[in-house]
Structure formats: structure tokens, C-alpha cells
Image (cartoon, grey):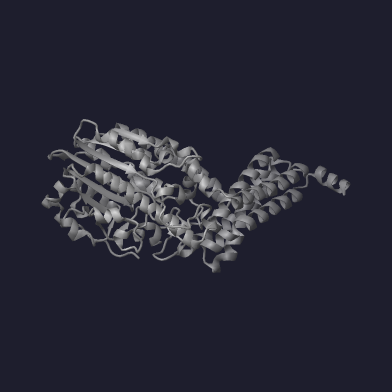
């Protein structure tokens, strides 16, 4: 046997290398692509997808394996990423798009700890072990000598990919889910992994350029002719309106919002189903139908108030997301005063939204009597049991482990506890503003799956699902503000369907700002507010 292997090694037979490439290709695709196809594409396309997957993978593995040292690095990275993404496809039903990569690289240590579990670790270790076997084989066999032979073999591998363009192009026209999501393209690993690495890097470069350009941009045209006023926007995370008592939910999850007289609106459609994309969209004048670059090129709510002479602040529980190069960090930079909870990366500590209240007090004590502040909460973001203190727990048993290892009852109990904690935080803000001319606006960046459609938590690019793409919206007025006839339209408009597009126009218009940038048809304080059609 040793002599046979020794002969193979010395032969440098290109057919042996081709056989090796095909072995890696078939193994990788069967492990990590077949489940992806079953989850995301119609069954009649399955065999076409398998053939295209093999063809695509073969080209990548052929090139990566030409140099054994390149293969030594490339193989374990692709197998580890493939294993991890395959696990999340199976459990969270993620799509392997740029959104998943943003989620991977822009999360913080504490949030990452919430999804790391033995099953995921085992999946990744198995992938690395399999790659180690192929690395050992690649170092043992001979390569392909001569540029001509390498070119001929590469052409043979590329040919089926070229031929495979036709069925893929046809596949892109297939509609997915209710409402019909198109243009998802064909997700094949490791090609999609490499593509997303490239696009993520490119997006980060563009984001840095937008960030620099925003600093140099002129102030938007905005004016304010009123007196002292405090405007607060409580922007929570992953909160569903149907789990709020104020919207008819059976549990007392928001008793303070009810007793304090918040005006709660009907469905509001989110810009996106992820924080990094939804927040810059809802904070700016850009429409939710536009690309993220449009969000970051438009003035934000804070830049409008700043131009109108207000002292502005961004106070956030989401330290990592708000301080890294992300969409939220760009709009946060518009504020005069910023605070990000630095403890977010300490796994041993629980970071509660109530920790922001001392920072709010500091901001409210600043001399300018006109103030506008965004309070960006962790709210109901996974993992739920870390979002509220033991004293705030109202329902049990609660989920304290990986969300897919808990019963649905435990998941919902923990989630509802986060809603109640957010309600207590909101009550604490109201208490600070009762004696002022004050407005509070309340919303969320996106919703959350709680078992519907076999999904839990949330992910990018799933706007066709109401559970993650419909959010709450509510308004509170202090006693002195209630006397202002400008707010009479609030009660009349509360049954209208709105979207995140309304937030920029509503907060600025309701607060008394005037600007050619404000569209009255999108303001909840306007008689002309347009109600959107029912999408679900």
C-alpha cells in the first residue's frame, strides 16, 4: 500500500489531482449546499441546483488546490464558515447574503455569546476535521505541472459553470414567500462566502467615505419658532406590537404605557429586519425602498433638530453597533452628545437599558432648554433573559439557554419579560418629563420570530414576514402639550397604517420644526397623513 501511495505521489498525474478536486467538491456541496437548496428554492429546481453547485465549487477548489500552501489556509476557513453558516441555515433559516455577514461582523461579544452553543461548535469542529483530511491528501499527492495543462483543466472546469448560467438566470425570476421576493440569486458556498467577504469589505469602505462626507455636509434647512421643548425618541429593538398590552395583547406587558396615555398606532412597516440597516433608514428622510447608501446621504432627525437650535443626543445601550463603522454610527455622529454603554462586550455583566437613565439625566441638565434625544435600547433583542433584572421577571419558566433548545412557552415568557422591562424604562422617562413641554415617540427597528414559520429570532431580508417587519409606534404628550390643537390629528390618525418613512417627518413636524424637507403627508400630526395599503 505504501508503494502504491508513493507511486501516486511521484506521478504528478493531472487526473489524480482532478479526482481530488472532485472529491472535495462533492463532499463540500453535499455537506453545506444541499440543505440550503431544500430551504430556499422550489423542489423542481433541486437537481439543477446540485449540478450548478458542483460546477461552481469545482472551479474554486481547483484554483485553491493548485498551491498546497494556499489550500492549507483556504480549506479550513471555508469548511469552518460553511459549517457555521449551514448550522444557521438549518436552525435560523438564514439566507447566505451580505446581511448574514453584516450580522456576523457587526455583532458584539455579548450577543455572539447568546448564539454560541455546543451544536454549533461541534458543527464547526467537524468541518475543520474534514478539511484537515483533505489537506493531508493534498500534501501527499502530486500537483499539476505546466501552465498549459493547468489552463486546459481550468477550462474544463469552467465550461459547466458557463453553461449553468441559463438555469440560474431563470431561477432568479422565481418568487419566494408571500408577497414575492425576487432577485435572491443562487446561493452556493464557498462561492457565496467569498462574494460576501468582498461585498462586506467594499460596503465598509463606502460607509467610511459616507461617514467622512457627512461630517463635511452643510446643515439641513430647518427652523423652530417655539419655546422650551424636550423631544425624546425611544427606539427599542426587536419589539413586536402584538405583544404589547396597549395593542390588545392579553398579558400586562405595557401597563405604564396604557396608564400614561400613550397614543398607539396601527401597524407600522419597518425599513428592514436588521438593526444596522433599519436604524439609519428610519432616522433619515430616505425611503425604505431605497438602498442603504441613500439613508446615509440624507439628513437625520438629529441633524434637523441641531440645525433648528436644539441640543441633541444619542444615548445607546448598543455600544458595539453604534461605535463601529455601521449605519447607526453614522446617524449617531450627528448628535452633539453621545453615550454608548461600554459594558456591552463584558460577557459576565448584564447590561440593562435602565443604565441609560443617569446619562439621560446628565443630558437633560445641560443649559440649552431645547433638547432632542434618541434613546437606543437593547429592548427585546436576543438573548432575552439578559435584558431584564431578576426583579423584573413576571412570567416563568423563562428561556435562559439557546433559543432553539427552549420550549416555545419559555421563549415567549422571556420575550414578554423584555417587553415589560421596556415599559418600565419608558415610565421612568415619562416621570422625568411630566413637568416639561415634552414629547415622547416610541418605536422599534424590527420585530421578532417567536416560533412562527419554524423560525425564532430574526435575520436580514425577510420583509415578507409580518412577525419581523411590523413594528409598534406610539406618541406621548406632556400635560402642557395636550392643550396644543396641533396634536388633534394624532387620535384621528392612529388607525392608519404607516411605515418607518413616517418617523422622520412625524418627529420633526409634531415638534414644531419647519423645513422644505418635511412631508406633511407622512406626518402623524397632519390631517393629510396617507394610510398605506395592508401588505399582510
Front-most of residues 14 and 109: 109
Corner quadrant of residue 324: top left
Q: Position of residue 48 (x, y in %)?
A: 58, 63
Lateral position of residue 151 relative to residue 495, left or right: right
Lateral position of residue 527 relative to residue 408, left or right: left
Front-most of residues 402 and 518: 402
For image coordinates 36% across by 37% down, the residue present is: 210
* Residue 192 to residue 215: above or below: below
Residue furthest to the front in view is 391
For image coordinates 19% across by 39% down, the residue present is: 221
* Residue 302 to residue 426: above or below: above
* Residue 42 to residue 520: above or below: below
For image coordinates 44% across by 48% down, the residue present is: 390
Residue furthest to the bottom in view is 44
Lateral position of residue 55 relative to residue 226, left or right: right
Q: Quadrant of the C terminus?
A: bottom left
Q: Position of residue 456 (x, y in %)?
A: 47, 58
Whether residue 463 is visible, yes or no, is no
Q: Position of residue 518 (x, y in %)?
A: 20, 47
For image coordinates 35% across by 57% down, the residue present is: 253
Front-most of residues 105 and 70: 105
Whether residue 381 is visible, yes or no, is yes
Q: Number of numbered discs present?
A: 0
Amino acid at each position: 500500500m505504501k508503494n502504491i501511495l508513493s507511486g501516486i505521489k511521484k506521478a504528478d498525474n493531472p487526473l489524480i489531482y482532478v479526482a481530488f478536486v472532485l472529491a472535495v467538491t462533492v463532499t463540500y456541496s453535499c455537506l453545506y449546499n444541499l440543505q440550503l437548496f431544500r430551504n430556499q428554492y422550489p423542489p423542481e429546481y433541486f437537481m439543477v441546483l446540485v449540478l450548478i453547485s458542483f460546477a461552481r465549487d469545482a472551479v474554486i477548489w481547483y484554483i485553491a488546490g493548485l498551491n498546497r500552501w494556499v489550500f492549507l489556509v483556504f480549506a479550513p476557513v471555508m469548511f469552518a464558515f460553511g459549517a457555521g453558516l449551514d448550522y444557521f441555515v438549518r436552525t435560523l433559516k438564514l439566507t447566505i447574503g451580505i446581511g448574514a455577514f453584516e450580522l456576523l461582523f457587526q455583532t458584539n461579544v455579548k450577543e455572539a455569546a447568546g448564539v454560541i452553543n455546543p451544536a454549533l461548535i461541534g458543527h464547526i469542529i467537524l468541518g475543520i476535521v474534514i478539511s484537515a483530511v483533505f489537506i493531508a491528501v493534498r500534501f501527499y499527492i502530486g500537483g499539476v505541472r505546466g501552465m498549459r495543462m493547468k489552463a486546459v483543466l481550468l477550462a474544463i472546469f469552467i465550461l459547466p459553470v458557463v453553461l449553468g448560467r441559463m438555469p440560474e438566470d431563470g431561477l432568479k425570476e422565481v418568487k419566494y414567500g408571500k408577497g414575492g421576493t425576487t432577485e435572491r440569486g443562487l446561493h452556493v458556498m464557498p462561492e457565496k462566502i467569498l462574494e460576501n467577504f468582498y461585498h462586506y469589505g467594499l460596503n465598509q469602505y463606502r460607509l467610511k467615505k459616507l461617514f467622512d462626507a457627512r461630517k463635511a455636509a452643510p446643515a439641513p434647512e430647518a427652523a423652530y419658532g417655539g419655546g422650551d421643548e424636550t423631544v425624546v425618541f425611544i427606539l427599542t429593538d426587536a419589539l413586536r406590537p402584538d405583544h404589547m398590552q396597549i395593542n390588545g395583547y392579553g398579558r400586562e406587558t405595557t401597563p405604564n404605557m396604557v396608564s400614561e396615555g400613550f397614543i398607539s398606532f396601527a401597524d407600522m412597516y419597518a425599513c428592514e429586519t436588521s438593526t444596522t440597516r433599519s436604524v439609519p433608514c428610519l432616522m433619515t428622510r430616505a425611503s425604505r425602498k431605497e438602498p442603504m447608501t441613500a439613508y446615509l446621504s440624507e439628513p437625520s432627525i438629529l441633524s434637523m433638530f441641531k440645525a433648528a437650535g436644539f441640543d441633541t443626543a444619542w444615548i445607546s445601550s448598543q455600544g458595539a453597533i453604534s461605535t463601529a463603522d455601521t449605519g447607526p454610527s453614522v446617524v449617531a455622529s450627528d448628535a452633539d452628545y453621545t453615550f454608548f454603554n461600554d459594558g456591552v462586550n463584558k460577557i459576565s455583566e448584564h447590561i440593562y437599558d435602565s443604565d441609560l437613565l443617569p446619562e439621560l439625566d446628565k443630558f437633560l441638565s445641560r443649559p440649552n432648554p431645547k433638547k432632542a434625544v434618541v434613546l437606543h435600547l437593547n429592548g427585546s433583542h436576543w438573548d432575552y433573559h439578559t435584558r431584564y433584572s431578576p426583579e423584573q421577571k413576571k412570567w416563568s419558566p423563562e428561556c435562559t439557554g439557546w433559543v432553539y433548545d427552549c420550549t416555545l412557552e419559555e421563549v415567549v415568557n422571556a420575550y414578554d419579560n423584555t417587553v415589560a422591562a421596556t415599559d418600565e424604562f419608558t415610565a421612568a422617562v415619562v416621570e422625568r418629563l411630566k413637568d416639561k413641554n415634552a414629547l415622547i415617540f416610541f418605536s422599534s427597528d424590527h420585530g421578532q420570530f417567536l416560533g412562527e414559520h419554524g423560525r425564532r429570532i430574526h435575520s436580514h431580508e425577510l420583509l415578507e414576514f409580518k412577525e419581523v417587519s411590523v413594528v409598534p409606534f406610539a406618541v406621548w404628550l406632556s400635560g402642557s402639550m395636550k392643550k396644543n390643537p396641533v396634536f388633534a390629528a394624532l387620535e384621528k390618525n392612529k388607525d392608519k397604517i404607516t411605515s418607518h418613512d413616517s418617523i422622520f417627518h412625524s418627529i420633526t413636524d409634531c415638534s414644531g420644526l419647519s423645513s422644505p424637507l418635511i412631508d406633511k403627508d407622512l406626518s402623524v400630526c397632519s390631517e393629510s397623513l396617507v394610510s398605506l395599503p395592508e401588505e399582510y
